[in-house]
Image: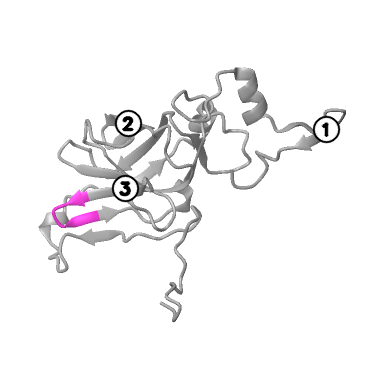
Amino acid sequence: MTHRGRMNVPIGSSDVDRKDLPEFEPVAEVVPRGPLDRDKLVVQSVELHKDQNKAAHRTNSFKHDGLIIRRGQVFTLTVTFDRVYTPKDTVILEFTIGDNFLSDKETYITLNLGARTGNKWETRNTVNGNTVTVDIKPLADCIVGMYCFNVIVVTPLGKFRTKRDPNTDFYILFNAWCREDAVFLNNESQRTEYVLNEQGVIYNGDTENVTQKSWNYGQVKNREP
């Protein structure tokens, strides 16, 4: 604190700020390593199905390599493990936005793969040997912005988290096609014009002297959404 009583370091408020989480969180300060974690499930890869999801969410026109989806609509990801996934395994999908994330602020979302109820976002799993494909439906009023994604395997020793990977970051946008979203538009031509159109016309002036000019919205150029 300074002599004026204010914090020297301001609290982060941008979704591009990131806090790397530990790859291992023990259940106690001192943890014996041994047979308990020998057979633990290990994440080998994560597939976000970017092309498939971006086409379904009408975001494939964005000149951005990462995944971009719209809230209130299902997207799909696949996690591959080193062995067959069973109901006895505890696996958590972890989504964070910003670097001061909190569960009660909806900036920290965890989805338990084995839970039938209780997850904040709807999920449906398809297990095929050592791969689990998950359909996820974010809430229609979830925070928009860039999310970090991790997979956590919980064992008696603690939580094993996948290493921070910018390639699994993704964006959630407003969804004018979702009735539960506050920005919903009930007219497809309006959605095309206001959401998908890259170019349009800007009108200015007054009632007796209206002028117009072409305008490039720049929504899908090579930058962040």
For image coordinates 31% across by 59% down, the residue present is 23
* Comparing labels 1 and 3, the label whose residue is closer to the camera: 1
Expressed as whole percent of the image width and height from the top left, the position of residue 125 reads 29, 30
Expressed as whole percent of the image width and height from the top left, the position of residue 192 reads 64, 24
In the rendered structure, are the residues bearing label 2 and label 3 in contact, judged by CB atoms less than 8 Å apart?
Answer: no
Pointer 1: what residue? 206
User: As rendered, which of 153 and 98 lies closer to the eye?
Assistant: 98
Of labels 1 and 2, earlier in sequence is 2
Q: CA distance from mark 2 to mark 3?
A: 18 Å
Q: Look at label 3 and name its amino acid.
A: Asp
Please indicate whether residue 151 sits to the left or right of residue 38 in the image.
right
Pointer 3: what residue? 104
* Comparing labels 2 and 3, the label whose residue is closer to the camera: 3
Q: Secondary structure at mark 1?
A: strand
Q: Secondary structure at mark 3?
A: helix
The quarter of the picture where residue 176 lies is top right
As drawn, the residue found furthest toward the bottom would be 3
Of labels 1 and 3, earlier in sequence is 3
Magenta residue check for 118: no
Expressed as whole percent of the image width and height from the top left, the position of residue 106 reads 36, 45
Which residues are the magenta region? 154-159
Q: Can residue 42 be spotted in the picture?
A: no
The quarter of the picture where residue 159 lies is bottom left
* Comparing labels 1 and 2, the label whose residue is closer to the camera: 1
Q: Secondary structure at mark 2?
A: strand
For image coordinates 56% across by 29% down, the residue present is 58
For image coordinates 31% across by 48% down, the residue present is 103
Q: Look at label 2 and name its amino acid.
A: Glu
For image coordinates 62% across by 30% down, the residue present is 195
Q: CA distance from mark 1 to mark 2?
A: 49 Å
Expressed as whole percent of the image width and height from the top left, the position of residue 158 reads 19, 56
Pointer 2: what residue? 122
